[in-house]
Image (spheres, rainbow, N blue to C red):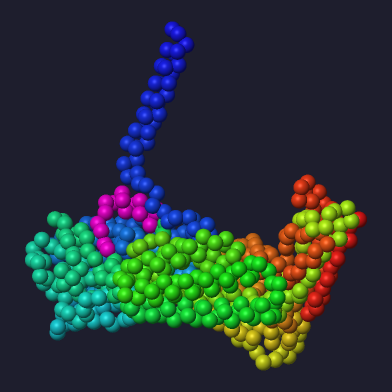
């Protein structure tokens, strides 16, 4: 056999093998789907850092007949439901478990809504419902509601109300629903209706809301076995919660992937109408333009020759607010869809900037991923307004920090055997500072009972460190930290120990008391204490479980915000000015060509003075 024939045969065998492999892959994966994940933003998404939570449980009702559902907000799966019915003729007793995945800020949540609808001894209906919200570190809250049927008018009366309903998880208003209607033989259950009932014009009772709807209003469709096939619950503002029946195997799949896109349900709580939302956004953008203009002028006046990145962050926010406001105003008479797309495109264009040239909050906010999903576009104006204001607060805090704590330093290299204006690389690293951060591992993981929840007017004696309660600080950050440092020799600390879960919904921090939120609280405390001129030793008391994460965040804060490490290009015999913290620094000069160290020396920067450093290198 000739060599050419052998080559041809081997080539054909290779093609056949490849095609066979492809066919096997597709035939063995009947539910193979294309990757529908959101586009890469080039920035971190804090809510996706936790891979193992939230994962809903694979639940089946203990009653005789069962059905399973996926719940979507538009096209985003946000929950799953397992329904059980004991008697197919009456539909009672019945129970349900609905699991929702979401987040508060960057904190992932799993909210479990359970309900039992049954007869009491007097043959009247009783509905009990509970909510338990879980975080990665344990339960967040437990609520219970109880309804009983009135013997006179058959209406269900809420006799115990602690907020345990669907609206306790998704804080939105449900349209077209009614309460105080009789629960009788003419009523269909939302998730089940017996064959004997004529449902053409019947009212439908939704147990997990405690409300009645007409079947037409929720577009409810039922299968032959009586279970719900699909229905829609309309939310005020235009959104819809869609319930769709799925197989048990598909339900199992959703328990594993329903948390791929976590939505912050808190955005729903403030929504009213798109017209008002656009007005709120325009006011916010006007405020942004005014504040960035003032900030630019203050920086030029108080911090001349400030770092490129500090100035660039302000400029980027200013351009964003001015351009978006102008575009929305120009399209005032266009449809809402046109204006919503303008908002999304503006955010996406802003995120194309280098993340170092954006406010830290904006660059790493998980909410920016929502601008890549059209389903919740009606929330874009409100989200844009809130993240803009939070980013501005950060820029103003950073300016105050630079103004209060940094000194202007002029650095000049005089290298004898190098041409004037020849460029070298210089690294300036802080080795001893008047402002120090210390992360201490607590012997006991729980937050100390002695941590302060309020600031006293005076102290009877000096403490080694005064620790603030981390949860109290998270709820109210505008406290006078400077006064504590004055009273206690410049020392202040924050206690980030384990504590009962609760929701934090402040301007700067949103979340529950999990790792992500505590790390963010640590960063905010570092900013506030650094701005305070009287503070020179800042402590973070943490349990061992979060020590590494807090240390990493503080080191990043020192490097990016305080400028503890600077790398820049210097021209020989030309002075370069920069703002850095007072302290002792090591200056290392290396060749751009070979990377060899040309010189290494130390210098000190005094507080409140302009310092000139000249490195003479023979």
Q: Which corner quadrant of the image does residue 8 belong to?
A: top left
Above or below, comparing residue 195 to residue 123 in the picture: above
Where does the magenta region start and end? 242-258
Q: Is residue 141 left or right of residue 613?
A: left
Q: Residue furthest top?
A: 1
Q: Is residue 103 left or right of residue 130?
A: right
Residue beneath the point at 47% across and 71% down: 323
Residue beneath the point at 62% across and 80% down: 297
Question: 90 or 351: which is nearer to us?
Answer: 351
Question: 69 or 72: which is nearer to us?
Answer: 72
Residue 495 in sight from this viewpoint: no
Q: Position of residue 400 (x, y in %)?
A: 65, 79
Q: Position of residue 340 (x, y in %)?
A: 37, 68
Q: Position of residue 555 (x, y in %)?
A: 68, 64
Q: Position of residue 364 (x, y in %)?
A: 53, 64
Q: Residue furthest bottom?
A: 457
Q: Is residue 15 magenta?
A: no
Looking at the rendering, in which quadrant would you find the C terminus?
Answer: bottom right
Q: Is residue 257 magenta?
A: yes
Above or below, comparing residue 153 to residue 96 in the picture: below
């Amino acid at each position: 056999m000739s060599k050419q024939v052998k080559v041809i045969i081997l080539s054909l065998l290779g093609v056949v093998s490849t095609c066979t492999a492809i066919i096997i892959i597709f035939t063995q994966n009947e539910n193979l789907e294309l990757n529908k994940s959101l586009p890469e933003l080039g920035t971190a998404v804090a809510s996706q850092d936790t891979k193992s939570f939230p994962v809903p449980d694979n639940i089946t009702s203990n009653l005789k007949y069962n059905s399973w559902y996926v719940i979507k907000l538009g096209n985003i799966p946000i929950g799953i439901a397992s329904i059980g019915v004991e008697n197919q003729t009456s539909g009672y007793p019945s129970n349900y478990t609905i699991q929702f995945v979401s987040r508060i800020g960057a904190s992932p949540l799993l909210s479990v809504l359970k309900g039992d609808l049954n007869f009491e001894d007097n043959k009247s209906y009783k509905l009990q419902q509970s909510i338990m919200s879980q975080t990665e570190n344990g339960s967040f809250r437990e609520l219970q509601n109880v309804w009983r049927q009135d013997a006179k008018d058959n209406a269900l009366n809420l006799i115990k109300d602690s907020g345990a309903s669907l609206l306790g998880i998704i804080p939105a208003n449900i349209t077209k629903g009614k309460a105080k209607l009789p629960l009788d033989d003419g009523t269909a259950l939302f998730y089940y209706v017996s064959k004997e009932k004529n449902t053409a014009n019947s009212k439908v009772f939704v147990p997990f809301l405690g409300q009645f709807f007409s079947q037409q209003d929720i577009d409810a469709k039922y299968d032959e076995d009586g279970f719900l096939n699909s229905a829609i619950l309309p939310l005020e503002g235009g959104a819809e919660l869609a319930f769709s029946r799925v197989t048990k195997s598909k339900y199992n799949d959703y328990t594993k992937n329903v948390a791929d896109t976590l939505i912050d349900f808190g955005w729903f709580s403030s929504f009213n109408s798109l017209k008002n939302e656009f007005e709120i956004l325009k006011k916010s953008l006007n405020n942004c333009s005014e504040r960035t203009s003032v900030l630019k002028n203050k920086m030029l006046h108080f911090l001349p020759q400030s770092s490129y990145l500090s100035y660039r962050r302000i400029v980027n926010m200013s351009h964003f607010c001015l351009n978006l406001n102008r575009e929305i105003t120009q399209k005032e008479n266009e449809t809402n869809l046109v204006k919503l797309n303008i908002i999304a495109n503006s955010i996406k264009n802003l995120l194309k900037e280098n993340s170092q040239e954006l406010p830290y909050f904006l660059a790493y906010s998980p909410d920016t991923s929502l601008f890549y999903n059209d389903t919740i576009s009606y929330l874009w104006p409100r989200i844009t307004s809130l993240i803009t204001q939070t980013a501005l607060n950060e820029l103003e805090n950073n300016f105050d920090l630079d103004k209060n704590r940094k000194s202007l330093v002029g650095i000049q290299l005089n290298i004898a055997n190098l041409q004037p204006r020849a460029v070298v690389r210089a690294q300036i690293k802080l080795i001893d500072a008047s402002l120090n951060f210390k992360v201490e591992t607590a012997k006991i993981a729980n937050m100390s009972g002695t941590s302060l929840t309020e600031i006293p007017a005076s102290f009877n004696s000096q403490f080694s460190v005064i620790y603030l309660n981390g949860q109290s600080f998270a709820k109210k950050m505008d406290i006078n930290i400077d006064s504590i440092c004055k009273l206690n020799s410049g020392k202040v600390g924050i206690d980030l120990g384990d504590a009962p879960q609760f929701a934090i919904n402040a301007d700067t921090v949103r979340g529950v008391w999990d790792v992500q939120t505590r790390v963010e609280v640590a960063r905010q405390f570092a900013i506030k204490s650094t701005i305070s001129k009287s503070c020179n030793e800042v402590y973070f008391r943490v349990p061992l479980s979060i020590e590494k994460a807090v240390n990493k965040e503080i080191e990043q804060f020192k490097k990016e915000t305080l400028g503890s490490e600077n790398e820049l290009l210097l021209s020989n015999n030309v002075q370069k000015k920069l703002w850095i913290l007072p302290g002792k620094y090591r200056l290392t000069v290396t060749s751009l060509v070979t990377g060899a160290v040309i010189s290494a020396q130390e210098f000190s920067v005094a507080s409140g003075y302009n310092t000139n450093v000249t490195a003479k290198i023979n």
